[in-house]
Image (cartoon, rainbow, N blue to C red):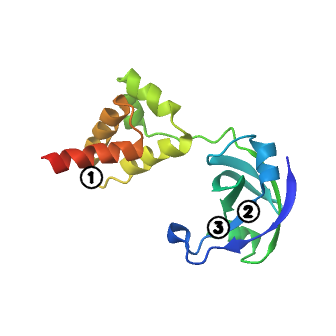
Amino acid sequence: MPLFTTTILRFGNQGEKTGWYYIVIPEEITQRLKPGCKKAYRVKGKLDGHAISGVALLPMGGGEFIMPINASMRKALAKGEGASLTVRLTVDLDFRIDAPADFTDCLADDPVAEQFFFQLPKSHQGYFIKWIDSAKTNPTRAKRISRALIALSAKKNFSGMMRMFQQKYLDE
């Protein structure tokens, strides 16, 4: 498990990342964790002795990644912007998304959709699950599960599904 020291930073005016607290994971460390990887992935480990798991590392280009430090992490660490942090990380191979039973039951009836869904990165599986779980009524939930299955059968990821259904509405 690579060990390094870093500083908690905060984005100023940076689009969707405005106000985020984060730490930089140097290229040397990311190459030891997951050589050649240029996509987001999940890690576990310790920040100053505080255990973390399932935390995303986000690519920033040039081989560097960042790790967002959310409010609960900052509270547990009792640290904020500018504070020094000792970090020990490893790839979190145990991270998994729990899909709701009604969705997995429907997936089981469509092998193409099921296979494609479980080939997606876990974070992308999470987009579908959060969208389905955020439905406020049972009819809306059923409609979302149906749309997810149609899109997954067509081998569309979440954003592809949204574009697919948005185009259908524009064509009607």
Q: Nearer the viewer, mark 3 or mark 2?
A: 2
The numbered disc on residue 24 is: 2
Instruction: Indicate the amino acid at tag 1.
Output: Thr
Where does residue 112 sit, x and y in percent of width and height? 39, 23
Q: Residue furthest left?
A: 172
Where does residue 84 sit, x and y in percent of width and height? 82, 72
- Mark with earlier residue (3, 2): 2
What distance separates the C-alpha of mark 3 from that of mark 1?
Answer: 30 Å
Going by the image, does 117 lie left or right of 135?
A: right
Q: Residues within 10 Å of mark 3 (few under 14, many from 20)?
A: few
Kindly identify the residue that appears in the image at 35 percent across and 23 percent down: 109
Instruction: Indicate the amino acid at tag 2.
Output: Val
Residue position for label 3: 72
Q: Residue furthest front?
A: 62
Residue position for label 1: 137
Hey, which quadrant is residue 10 in on the image? bottom right
| Disc 3 and disc 2 in contact, CB within 8 angstroms | no
- Mark with earlier residue (3, 1): 3
Q: Residues within 10 Å of mark 1 (few under 14, many from 20)?
A: few
Where does residue 67 sit, x and y in percent of width and height? 68, 59
Kindly identify the residue that appears in the image at 63 percent across and 42 percent down: 95
Instruction: Indicate the amino acid at tag 3.
Output: Ser
Going by the image, does 41 lie left or right of 86?
A: left
